[in-house]
Image (cartoon, helix red, strand yellow):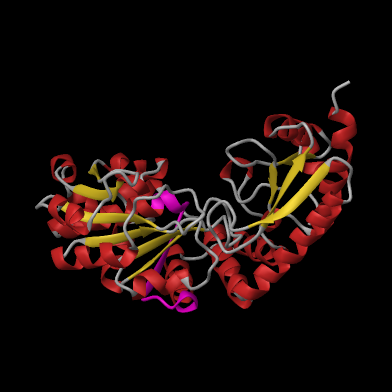
């Protein structure tokens, strides 16, 4: 799929080739032509929104093997609504009928190793986010640390699923351990799995194992609208999420999801489920092999397969190094071309990653062509 350069020229915005991955800063993933057609079709007709929601949510629940589903404007708003459901459950009434004092009397527990900027969704609602343990191995967290932190104000435990190789530091407890603590205390367990698709089993893995709800981004591995998120979970708990969500008045009213996003996300999930994890990985492996072979044939350039990707997903990417050039210089040079190529790299700045997830086949040649010019253009004189 080629960028619509005429549109970008009208706006005065330079289109990019995204070789880094599904990062929000460059628009997440890219929707397929089928998704775009379905999205445009949805935009052409008015419908009763609640009826469309009901049908889309039912289809999404069936596709993902869950009791219920709910589409939100991004994964962070999904966390917001899930936390709101825990508050509403504690007081036995819709969130908008809970006073500020009642909401602020509630606590959400999270392990220090799982803390991330997205969890501000909890504090935005007004509940207290209580951090348990330390994000290192000096004083390892134990199940009793979480159990002892639970009190009458605790409404849920927030668990961020990041597999080995992902962004989270060491020091968190396994999901099953946290689940057992939550069950024993009758506290809700919410899972943040925003970037954890694939593998496809994650759609139902956590909810079938005891989580009350799990949240995914619609604009990453699913290749739906970037402004979409997907909440999946137990029917009774999801009733609370729906009760507090759009288009109802109250807290959820500001979390608007249009008919276009509803249909587009459903379409994207359908397509996602047509392909297996093995097929997706094979496609990515072929693209990485092509990138590695192309780079290794260039003087001063080397590349190797790197696994897993930045989110810990079971997909490969290429790590490219250019003699005498660090990530800062490489990223500026790649971005300066026409079209610009957006890349990132390892923390030590020793090279740059090329991620096949956000690259089309016809963009590979453009990326390799840009890299081929780097040693000559940037070699010190």
Q: Is residue 51 above or below residue 113?
A: below
Q: Is residue 280 left or right of residue 287?
A: left
Q: Is residue 275 above or below residue 130?
A: below
The residue at the far left in this view is: 152
Q: Position of residue 357 (x, y in %)?
A: 67, 58
Is residue 17 at least partly visible in the picture?
A: no
73 in the magenta segment: yes
The residue shown at (57%, 64%) is 314
Q: Is residue 10 left or right of residue 145?
A: right
Q: Is residue 359 above or below residue 16?
A: below
In the rendered image, the quadrant that contains the C terminus is top right
Residue sitting nearer the eye, 281 or 97: 281
Residue sitting nearer the eye, 31 or 246: 31
The residue at the far front in this view is: 138
Q: Is residue 325 left or right of residue 258?
A: right
Q: Position of residue 221 (x, y in %)?
A: 58, 60
Q: Position of residue 191 (x, y in %)?
A: 36, 59
The residue shown at (39%, 46%) is 254
Q: Is residue 284 above or below residue 311?
A: below
**Where is residue 300, by image quadrant?**
top right
Q: Is residue 276 left or right of residue 3?
A: left
**Where is residue 37, by image quadrant?**
bottom right
233 in the magenta segment: no
**Where is residue 155, by image quadrant?**
bottom left
Looking at the rendered structure, the number of numbered marks drawn on it comes to 0
Magenta residues span 62-77
Residue sitting nearer the eye, 225 or 193: 193
Q: Position of residue 56 (x, y in %)?
A: 48, 70
In the rendered image, the quadrant that contains the N terminus is bottom right
Is residue 140 at least partly visible in the picture?
A: yes
């Amino acid at each position: 799929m080629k960028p619509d350069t005429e549109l970008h020229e009208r706006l005065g915005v330079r289109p990019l080739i995204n070789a880094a991955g599904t990062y929000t800063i460059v628009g997440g993933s890219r929707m397929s032509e089928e998704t775009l057609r379905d999205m445009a079709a949805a935009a052409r007709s008015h419908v009763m929104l609640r009826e469309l929601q009901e049908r889309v949510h039912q289809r999404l629940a069936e596709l993902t093997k869950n009791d219920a589903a709910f589409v939100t404007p991004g994964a962070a708003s999904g966390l917001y609504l899930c936390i709101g459901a825990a508050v509403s459950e504690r007081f036995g009434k819709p969130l908008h009928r809970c006073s500020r004092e009642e909401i602020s009397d509630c606590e959400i527990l999270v392990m220090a190793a799982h803390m991330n900027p997205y969890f501000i969704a909890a504090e935005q609602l007004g509940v207290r986010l209580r951090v348990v343990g330390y994000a290192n191995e000096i004083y390892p967290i134990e199940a009793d640390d979480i159990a002892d932190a639970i009190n009458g104000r605790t409404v849920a435990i927030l668990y961020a699923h990041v597999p080995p190789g992902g962004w989270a530091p060491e020091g968190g407890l396994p999901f099953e351990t946290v689940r057992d603590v939550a069950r024993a205390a009758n506290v809700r367990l919410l899972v943040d799995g925003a970037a954890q698709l694939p593998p496809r089993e994650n759609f139902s893995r956590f909810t079938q194992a005891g989580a009350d709800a799990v949240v995914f981004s619609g604009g990453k591995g699913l290749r739906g609208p970037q402004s979409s998120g997907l909440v999946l979970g137990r029917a009774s708990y999801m009733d609370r999420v729906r009760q507090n969500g759009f288009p109802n008045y109250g807290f959820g009213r500001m979390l608007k999801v249009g008919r276009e996003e509803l249909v587009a996300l459903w379409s994207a999930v359908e397509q996602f489920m047509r392909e297996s994890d093995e097929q997706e990985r094979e496609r990515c492996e072929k693209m990485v092999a092509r990138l590695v072979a192309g780079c290794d044939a260039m003087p001063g350039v080397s590349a190797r397969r790197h696994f897993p990707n930045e989110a810990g997903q079971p997909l490969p990417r290429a790590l490219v190094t250019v003699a005498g050039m660090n990530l800062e210089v490489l990223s500026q040079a790649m971005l300066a071309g026409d079209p610009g190529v957006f890349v990132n790299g390892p923390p030590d700045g020793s090279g740059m990653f090329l991620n096949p997830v956000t690259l089309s086949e016809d963009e590979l040649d453009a990326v390799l062509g840009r890299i081929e010019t780097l040693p000559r253009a940037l070699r010190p004189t």
